[in-house]
């Protein structure tokens, strides 16, 4: 895992640890939505679309387990 990925994972883990378990799913949904919107602004629709598509693909792949 790259240093950037480790930093991001640690940041999300800290943010989750400060919230009660019932608030964590909503926080993650909002984080995903804002992250996608940020990618649109920074890298454009196509790049954001690819990232969201890869995320959706990973979710579908995990669904069978």
Image (cartoon, helix red, strand yellow):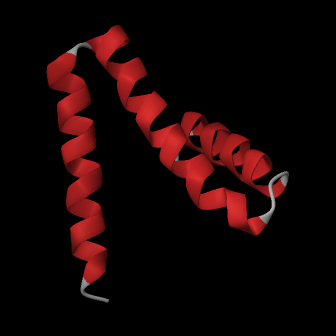
Q: Is residue 2 left or right of residue 37?
A: right
Residue placed at 22% from the left, 73% from the top? 61
Which residue is at the far bottom? Answer: 65
Q: What is the number of callouts on the image?
A: 0
Q: Is residue 41 left or right of residue 32?
A: left
**Height in image: 3 above or below 61?**
above
The percent position of residue 25, horizontal first and vertical second, equals 58, 60
Q: Is residue 61 left or right of residue 29?
A: left
**Height in image: 53 above or below 57?**
above
Residue 35, quarter of the rendered image: top left
Residue placed at 30% from the left, 76% from the top? 62
Which residue is at the far left? Answer: 46
The percent position of residue 8, horizontal first and vertical second, equals 61, 39
**Quadrant of the frame with the C terminus:** bottom left
**Height in image: 55 above or below 62?**
above
Residue toward you, 18 or 47:
18
The percent position of residue 49, horizontal first and vertical second, equals 19, 32
The percent position of residue 51, horizontal first and vertical second, equals 26, 38
Residue placed at 79% from the left, 48% from the top? 14
Q: Is residue 14 left or right of residue 8?
A: right
Residue 4, quarter of the rendered image: top right
Which residue is at the far right? Answer: 18
Residue toward you, 30 or 13:
30
């Amino acid at each position: 895992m790259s240093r950037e990925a480790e930093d991001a994972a640690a940041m999300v883990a800290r943010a989750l640890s400060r919230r009660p378990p019932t608030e964590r799913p909503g926080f993650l949904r909002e984080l995903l939505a804002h992250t996608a919107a940020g990618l649109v602004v920074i890298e454009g629709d196509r790049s954001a679309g690819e990232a969201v598509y890869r995320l959706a693909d990973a979710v579908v792949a995990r669904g069978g387990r």
